[in-house]
Amino acid sequence: MFFASDNSGPVHPEVLQVLAEANQGYQMGYGVDDLMDEVRDRIRTLFDAPDAAVYLVVNGTSANALALATLADPWQTVFCTPVSHIHRDECNAPEFYSGAKLTLVEGDDKMNTKALRAAIEAEGNRGVHGPQRGPVSITQVTECGTIYRLDEIRALGDMAQSYGLPLHLDGARFANALVALGCSPAEMTWKSGVDVVSFGGTKNGLMGVEAVVLFDPAKAQEFELRRKRGGHLMSKHRYLSAQMAAYLRDDLWLSSARMANDNCTRLADGLRAAGATFIYEPQANMIFARLPRHLHRRLIYAGAVYHMEGEELDGPDENALLSCRLVCDWSMQQAEIDRFLALVSNTASAAG
């Protein structure tokens, strides 16, 4: 009953198989391996972007930070939401690599055009004394487990473009959003105004690799130099390439995401039937729910692993509703979900 993070699950066996095959013999390093040629071609085909520049790095933080550094000058600011991963969970890495600051766009979850316009208009009007306007960055799936619809991305892309600003998409859970929307990668990115996407794999069955896809190839050399200067150009690059190649072959990335989302739907349906309330309506593979303190205690004592959202497990009010985050991955067994739901249901019945 492990719902702490989709980072915590195992590597998909098909990925391990391709890694084992890639481990035979010799290959040139630093991204000149044969598998990287395959990856580059597959991603360009997948995104219907034959001129896109494609690079691999080991984690989402480096993907986001290097992508934003390529888009932003040190005197600019990056517009993002207060709950964005680049603000909450990357230890100022985007600021470190780019020299730019972050400007938080007012809102609780998804960015909206009205708030974005207000944030943009508030900057870039103090001459040399203030930060200049820079990239807009959104997260898909959001940190609250919700999904930007295509029209919402397009509206933000149009808004950014009207000010001459690029749009970055943090796609750590790109596949989960895509299968939920039932659209194409092109529709969710460059056709909606996205200039650069961090195409995630680590949360969806890979050992540790993310792709950065730049739809403007003029930015390619700068990204290459920043990746090397920042210490993120792997010498034995073929092991990154092998993971991503396995991910893209036979649509493993899509089937894994569907499994994660289906697991989440099963969990959400069971929680809803047991009377749980949701902070955000589950849309992909994450659930933010409120459960009574006594139920949290029983679940955790029974071996369930998940994160409380700033709540204390110990407290005087046993019936107080405490917030938690539950995340499903591709490898989760339905029996474990059902065991968790049985504990929830039995406790609710006993309380009733």
Image (cartoon, rainbow, N blue to C red):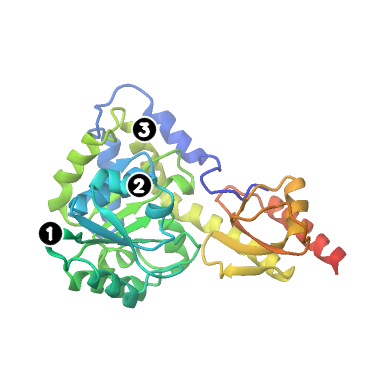
Q: Residue at x 72, y 55 (%)?
A: 296
Quick one: SS at disc 2?
A: loop
Which tag is nearer the camera, tag 3 or tag 1?
1
Question: Which mark is nearer the camera, 3 or 2?
Answer: 2
Q: Secondary structure at mark 3?
A: helix
Between 23 and 231, the residue placed more toward the observer is 231
Lower sequence index among marks 2 and 1: 2
> Residue visible at 78% across and 56% down?
343
**Would residue 263 be visible to someone looking at this image?**
yes
> Along the horizontal axis of the image, is 68 left or right of 180?
left
**Which residue appears at 65% of the width and 49% of the height?**
333
Q: CA distance from mark 3 to mark 2?
A: 28 Å
Image position, residue 69 (x, y; %): 23, 49
Marks counted in the figure total 3
Q: Dot 3, crowdedness within 10 Å: few (<14), some or many (≥20)?
A: many
Tag 2: residue type? Answer: Asn
* Residue at position x 16%, y 66% in the image: 126
* Mark sitting on residue 128: 1
Residue 54 seen from this side: no
Q: For mark 2, what is the residue?
A: 92
Mark-to-mark CA distance, 2 and 1: 23 Å
Disc 2: CA contacts within 10 A as few (<14), some (14-19) or many (>=20): some
Checking the image for residue 151, the label placed there is: none
* Amino acid type, label 1: Val
Do the residues bearing badges 2 and 1 touch, measured as CB atoms within 8 Å? no
Give the structural element (helix, strand or loop) at label 1. Answer: helix
